[in-house]
Image (cartoon, coloured by chain):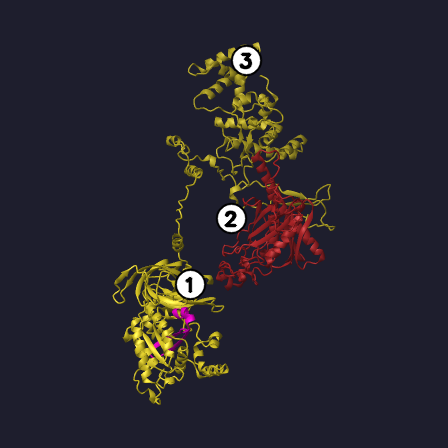
Chain colours: A red, B yellow
Amino acid sequence: MAALSDRRRINAPSGGTSAPVFSKALKEPGYLEELRPQRIRAPKELRKIFLQTSIIPSASGSAYLEIPNAPSSHPATLIPPTSSLKIAASVQGPKPLPRSAPFSPTLLLSTTVKFAPFATRHRRGYIRDAAERDLGVHLETALRGVIIGERWPKSGVEIVVTVLEGDEGAWWGQEGGSNGSGWGLLNVLAGCITAAGSAIIDAGIDCVDMVSGGVAAFVQDPSADGRLLVLDPSPAEHRDIIAACAVGYLHSRDEVTEVWLRGDAGLEAADSLIEGAAQAAEGSFSVMKEVFIENLEKNGNAQGLEGAGGKRKHADVEMAG
Amino acid sequence: MPPKSGHQRAKNIDYEDDDIYSDEEEYYEEGVEGDGMSEEDKQQMAAATIKVKEALGGSFKVTETQIQEALWHYYYDVGKSVSYLKNKYAPKVPAQPKQSQKPASRFDQAASAAGVGAPNGKLSSFIDSTTVCAALNLGLESCYSTPPPVHFPISYNFDRLTEDITNFFWDTPWGNVPSHRLGTIIPQTVAPKGGLLGGSKLAALAAKRKQKQQEQAAKAEEEGNDADKAVALLDRLSVKSDRPALLAPSDKAPKPAIRYQRKRSPSPQPQPQVESDEEPDLGTTRPTMEFPDLRAQPSMFATTLCSKNDSRPAGQSHQSTSFAEFALPYTSMVEFKKVDPFASPSPDDIVQEAQKRGAGRPSKPKATPKKPAGDKLAEAVDKLHVEEAPRVKSKNLNVVEEFAKSEMKRMMNFVVIGHVDHGKSTLMGRLLYDLKVIDQRSVDKLKKEAENIGKASFALAWVMDQTSEERSRGVTVDIATNNFETEQTRFTILDAPGHRDFIPNMIAGASQADFAVLVIDASTNSFESGLKGQTKEHALLVRSMGVQRLIVAVNKMDTINWSQHRFNEISTQMTTFLTTASFSPKQISFIPCAGLTGENVTHRNPDNSLLDWYTGPTLVSALDTSAPSPRPLDKPLRLTISDVFRGGITNPISITGRIDAGTLQIGDQILIMPSSEKATIKAIELDGEPVDWAVAGQIPTLHLQDIDPVHLRLGDIACAPNHPVRLIKSFTCKILAFEHVLPSSVDVFRGRLQAEGRIVRLSATLDKTSGEVLKKKPRIVRPGEVARVVVELQRELPLEVGVRIVLRERGSTVAAGLLEG
């Protein structure tokens, strides 16, 4: 356990602090199930996304992504029925590599994904655990496909993603805990890809396309012959998730840079799962595009420039050595 | 109507609402000139002017030109002109914006929408800005919260600018524009976009127009009118402006769904469920996905996080908060305007100025005292430096108290002196053997070894003489020390060499002694030869070294069958001699003994009837009865180094020596003179036992650190750093002459210390007992006389008043004395 080996800080109890569960939930067997959130969205309907770029002034590019949680349907519980996603991504660089580093003809990309200790109901440590490192690797593959690294030899860029609130793996009332299955990580990855992709564009790093993330899942549904494809599943809303897939998707090229498939989907189903995830990614791409167009207009009008050539704050990086 | 430039017309189209001001100006000027007016016009004008004047009445003060201008404007319509003039020139009635006569066409609307928002980089945009600026000056409502960021280096009159805008750049070359003609365009970040300003007419107008446009666009779509569709498209093309006037009035209006076309078919299989809820696109196989507006409103957290540059309009209630709108308090007050806080230099400037001045001045030469001749000052400066904290931690004992508390046995050092081969070492060996300091086995071993080289009688002497040279020669060369205890006292034996060649060593031993044991061979001729030889010299030396008590051990009594007669004879002879050497007769005791047999050394042999005549004490009990000399514990530390050696890896450098005065403990710093080097006492050993402290009178071994061995020499003085021994080069001393003393070169001995010097002057001869001056400046000091002489040394020595010195010349002791200063 990462939290156990962390002796530099005074760590909170690893179990985390939860909002109280009232005794009614324990006394009446059926009551708890009433609290279970239901998906009221259509299967193809995505949750709304809030995206904002340039939130960190000191970073060369940054973005903040939020998928707000649904308003609580039950006033009887303090715990929000579904979790929301809050991700902040920042891009540092491109900057020259230290002299000690070996020569690199392309841009060195390093990604760090870190959950805030309070991001999930199960409290996280300050040191990155295996899941966070795994997410970092996934994110790196997703971003590596878009950045034109040849334009920055001998330089590196650091992408730091902080998950301020992460999607839970399951509903809090479910047996086995909320983090057991880890389905929420797919949503987190998709959010990370969207946020980091926005931050990269905000930093003005040359890319072949805009990358956005999306998730699709097969859920157990008795009405639709066993399983149903849903886009952007919120794990709390689904009792059983059979398989899920997160992709990093390039809209203009119709390409996928990253696929993370979980669960037992089967060969054909996997194809449709990936396709569904790409559709979800397209949804987040629409938000990205809108936000960037809005930014362009704002900047263009403010600067009185023709056509507002975009934000290339650090387009020319002076290379030392 | 006078002809307008094409550019101005275009501008008019753009800004029907805004640039009334500049238009008016133009009309005014050109009206005065009257250019281009036909005769008919002039007549009409004159008639109408009169009518207007009548209508306005005399109270209204309007010039004729103003009336004419208004008439020109209104095509000689008298009624309109009158109302216009009344409106304009009536007090506190602002000019009304002129409404365009004909309804704006769809194209005009679109163009105006595009023109307002689109930054088109042409000259017109500059003019736009200036006119907007002018409108601001007029007090018209404006959507800008800050003036447009156009700054000209040369302040141009805006009127003139609008008048001959075409001539503005007439002298500007196409390339290499002179710098004074270049303007700086500072991009100003747009203020946070709020909703529309509350009561703005313009805003209301704009909102109304927008709504109308939307309605018309909807209508046009319904009708399928091609031309209107194009215009509607034009509308859509227009770049979105962040001017509030052109924003959607409410964000509640549902955004149109966004369509995204997929470039390729995602997979060979058709996906009916994906496209099920949307109409199939006609004429293309590309699947199109439709998402409702996915953008969410920020949560409370996100609002807080991103509020600084929130790009999304948060609704009508969101007020634009620009700092320019809030004036600083008190700025309108007279006091504020009077005060000019930046007139005087700032505190920082004052400091920097002072520093600059200070840096410019040549630094004051440091007052370095001139170094006077002589090393004494340098030495003193050397001593000045702050004492470093010793690495060995001192226990900070009060050694005097500790010593008193310890109730230690009396400690006495005695030196054994006597002529060579009188049996000093043997007697001491016997004493140690009988006192069980040396065990039987080692004595047996020594006996065996001694027999091997045919010197069986030397076996006991070898207890003390341990070096091979001493054993082979059969004489003591250097001082040997050993310890033994009686019931009352701890004794340290200093076995001095008897041979005349080793007198310096004997002096060193004698300087450490509290009292002396003079060993005399009682056998025939031996005593006499001894009396002529070292017996006499040693006795004189120990006396001059300050030893007062003397025990005369009449040795080898067994060889003369314990003859009482011989003993008495020796006693009388020695008493007379010793009293002349200024020993007090009370301090002299004679003890008959035999070192080889051990008779009367530690105990008397009751079988020996030959010694019945003697009733006195044994040698050991005589030693015991000796009163120790006082210990000057309170005086500063003085330790004469008698030996320097390497005590092993743990103790790389050690010294031994008698503490003449003072005390020391572990952790003390000591100053070694004359090298003036400091050392720290790491450990103290006394008689082979580690101790924490040592006091005057003891002969400890000190293990030192922080000092190089080259600074330690035999005879050096270790002293307390705060009370160092002074190094002197010449001194006066009172001497007892053994030989004839003349001014000549002599060797000066002080303990182990040995230096060449010279008696430069004989000051006086003194009376032996009273010390009165008998004769000043004698030519010669005879043996046995006491004199005061001045001695000059070749090098400086650590000597103090009261130390005892011995003067020797060419191997014989000339005199011994007391240093007086």
Q: Amino acid at mark 1?
A: Thr
Residue B500: within the magenta? yes
Q: Amino acid at mark 2?
A: Phe
B318 over B99 or under it: above or below: below
Q: Quadrant of residue B530?
A: bottom left
Secondary structure of the residue carrying tag 1 is strand
User: Which label's residue is closer to the chain start, 3 or 2?
Assistant: 3
User: Which label's residue is closer to the chain start, 3 or 1?
Assistant: 3
Whole-Å distance between the Cαs marked 2 and 1? Answer: 69 Å
**Badge 2: how crowded within 10 Å, few (<14), some, or many (20+)?**
few
Whole-Å distance between the Cαs marked 3 and 1? Answer: 114 Å
x, y percent for residue B702: 42, 67
Q: Which residue is mark 3?
A: B34
Can residue A219 be seen in this snapshot?
Answer: yes
Q: Quadrant of residue B762?
A: bottom left
Of residue B132 and residue A32, the one placed in the foreground of this image is: B132
**Badge 3: how crowded within 10 Å, few (<14), some, or many (20+)?**
few
Q: Which residue is mark 1?
A: B680
x, y percent for residue B497: 41, 73
Q: Which residue is mark 2?
A: B301
B386 over B293 or under it: above or below: below
Secondary structure of the residue carrying tag 3 is loop
Q: Quadrant of residue A236?
A: bottom right
Which residues, given as a range, are shown in magenta?
B480-507
x, y percent for residue B378: 40, 52
B683 over B101 or under it: above or below: below
Chain designation of label 1: B
Asked if labels 3 and 2 share a chain, the reply is yes
